Image (cartoon, rainbow, N blue to C red):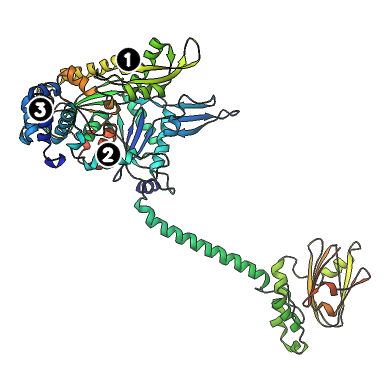
Amino acid sequence: MSEAFIPGFGASLAAAREAMGLSAADVADRLKLTARQIEALEAEDWSHLPDPVFVRGFVRNYARLVELDPDSLVNPVPAVETTTKAITAPSAGLRLDKSPFTHWLLLPLLLLALFLAVVAGLYAWLSQGEDTMLPTPVAEPPAAKSPAAASAPAAETVIKPVPVEPRATETPAAEVATPVQGVVEMIQPTPVTIPADQAPSEAAKPAGVSMRFEPEIDAWIQVVDGKGARHSRLVRAGTSEVITGTPPFRLVVGNAAEVKLTYNGHVIDLKPFIGEKVARLTLE
Amino acid sequence: MFGLLRGYFSTDLAIDLGTANTLIYVRGRGIVLDEPSVVAIRQEGLSGKKTIQAVGLEAKQMLGRTPGNIQAIRPMKDGVIADFNITEQMLKFFIKKVHDTRLFHPSPRIIICVPSGATQVERRAIRESAIGAGARQVYLIEEPMAAAIGAGLPVAEATGSMVVDIGGGTTEVGIISLGGVVYTASVRVGGDKFDESIINYIRRNYGMLIGESTAESIKKELGSAFPGSEVREMEVKGRNLAEGIPRSFTITSNEILEALTDPLNIIVSAVKSALEQTPPELGADIAEKGMVLTGGGALLRDIDRLLMEETGLPVIVAEDPLTCVVRGSGRALEEMDRLSTVFTND
C-alpha cells in the first residue's frame, strides 16, 4: 500500500498543517474526515484508513488545503500514467502500433505480389518472343524452301536478314519451312498464308494494284496491303511473283539488293530502303 | 466464415461515447483515441448530397464558424444519441481510425457506455449504431459502473462505493457494491449545461452574445463551484446584441460562479437524493470513504469543495477524471469473464 505514496508524506502534512496554525480537528472539519482519520494519515497508519484509492484522494485534498504540492506526496500510479500519456497526445493523424497479424500477413502478400509480377513478366516476355521467335506448326507446307528461308526468320525475326547460302539448298524442306511460315502464322493467324486458290481471286479484282518481284537469288518477301491482307512467301531465283492488293502496301523484302521490284509498271529502286539486307518500305 | 475472419483481424474496443468527447480503449494497448464527438457535414450544391467533411477535433474547430453548406453537428445530446445516422458514421470513422489494417473492414467486439438514465429505446439506438458501424457484438455498460471501475474503486467487494460522474451531457450518480449497482440516478446536467448557463448569463447581464467555444473557454478559465479567496478576470469577445457589433468586455470568476449556480444545484440535489436512497450499511461505508468524482465536470474548480460542504462527506476527485469511464470500460473488456456482471442486459 505504501508504495503508492512518497515516504514521510504524513510528517510533511503534519508539519505543513502546524506551520499554518491549524489543528487536526480544523483539517478534519474542512475535509469532512474524522479527527481519527487525520491522525492516521499523519501517522501513516494504514489500519485505520480505507482503500489506497481513497487515501490518495485524502492526501491530495489535505495537501491542497495546507498548500503543498499533491504530486510531491503521492506517487503516480503507473497504469494511470501511461494511459494519460496516450490520451494527451493529439489524436489527429493517430497511428497505432502495428498489430501483430500484419507482420505475418505482409510476407505472404509480398511473396504473392512477387509471384504475380514474375508470372506477368514471363507471360509478356514469352508472348513478345512468340511473335518473332517461336514458330508454330503451319497449315500449308511449302513446296520447297531454301536455306535463305531458314535463316531469314531466325535473323529477320522480322528485322535482320541473313546472307544467302546456296549450298544449303539440300537442307530438307520441312526443317526449314516451318520457321518461315511460323513468322507469318504468328503475326496474323487467320489470313496467314495465301492459299493457292486465293491468288487468282485477288488477281481477278480489277481495282487492285499489282507489283512484281523478280529476284536474282532466292528472296523472302512479305507484303501487307491496305486491307490487312498479308502475303509472305519465298520467291525463288529467276522466277517472278505478282501480288495484287489495295494500297498502301507495307513491304519487307529479304536480299533486297538482288530483287527487282516493279510497281504499276514503274521500277522501284529498293536501295535507299535497305538496312543490312532487308528493305522495309511502304508503297502508297 | 468471412465475419469470423474479419473478427480475427479486429481488436476488441471499449468506447466512451460521450456527449462532448469520444474515447476509445483498445484491448491490450490502452486508450488510443480521444476526439470531440463532433461531425462536420457538407451539403453538395446541386445534388443536395451530404458528405462528411470532418470528424473529431477538426470538426470541433468548425463549430460556430461554418459557411452555409457545412454543418458542424454534435450527434450526441444529454448522453444519448440525437442523430442516429451521424453517430453511426462517426463511430465508423473512429473504429476505422484505431484499426491499422486496410485489408479487412474491422468487425470488433465493442463495449460501449450508456448513461444509467438512458431509456430502452436510447440504449437500443446506441447498440444498433455500434452494430451499424461494424461491431460484431456489442456489450453495454452503465457509466457509473464504468467510472467506478476506472477510478479504481473496490466495486467487487462487499463495501459501498459512491461515484459521481459529471460528463458533458449528464451527471451520473451511482452507488456500487459487490459488482452491481445498488442505486443509480442520472440528471441531464453536465458540462454543456454549464456552457449554456454562461451564455445565458452573459446575454442577460451584459447584452452580449458569445459562442459555445467561448463559453467553454470561460468555464475552463474562470469556472468554479465554490467561492474562492481570489477573484480572477478574463477578457471576453462577443457580439453586442443592441449594437450588433463585436465588442470585448471583462468578466470575473464570481460572476461565472453565479451563472453556474443553477446547474450545480441540480447536481447537488441528485447527490443528496442518492444518499437518501442508500441503504444504511452502504451509507456508513460512504461516510467513511466519501464519494469519488469523475468526468470532465470534476475538473471544475472547487466542485469537490461544494459537494463536501453540501453533504458533509469527504469528496475526492479521481486521478485523470476525464478518462475514468473509458478506462473502466477497458478494464471490463480486459477482464470480460471475471467482470461479466457489470454489463447491462438491456
Q: Residue at x 42, y 42 (%)?
A: A93
Determine the secondary structure under disc 3: helix
Q: Residue at x 6, y 25 (%)?
A: A35
C-alpha distance separating marks 1 and 2? 39 Å
**Earlier along the polypeptide chain: callout 1 or callout 2?**
1
Q: Is residue B56 in view?
A: no
Three-letter residue code for mark 1: Glu
Determine the secondary structure under disc 1: helix
Three-letter residue code for mark 3: Glu
> Is residue B226 rendered to the left or right of residue A24?
right
**Closer to viewer: mark 2 or mark 3:** 3
To the question of a shared chain for discs 1 and 3, the answer is no
Q: Give the residue pinned by disc 1.
A: B255
Number of other residues with Cα within 10 Å of mark 3, as a class: few under 14, some 14 to 19, many 20 or more: few
Q: Chain of mark 1?
A: B
Number of other residues with Cα within 10 Å of mark 2, as a class: few under 14, some 14 to 19, many 20 or more: many
Image spot of residue B332 (x, y percent): 24, 38
Front residue of B215 and B49 = B215
Res. A126 image quadrant: bottom right
Instruction: Tell me the quadrant of the picture where the N terminus of chain A can be found.
Output: top left
C-alpha distance separating marks 2 and 3? 43 Å
Image spot of residue A122 (x, y percent): 56, 67
Q: Residue at x 73, y 73 (%)?
A: A159
Three-letter residue code for mark 2: Gly
> Is residue B161 rendered to the left or right of residue A40?
right
Q: Give the residue pinned by disc 3.
A: A18
To the question of a shared chain for discs 2 and 3, the answer is no
Instruction: Tell me the quadrant of the picture where the C terminus of chain A can be found.
Output: bottom right
**Closer to viewer: mark 1 or mark 2:** 1
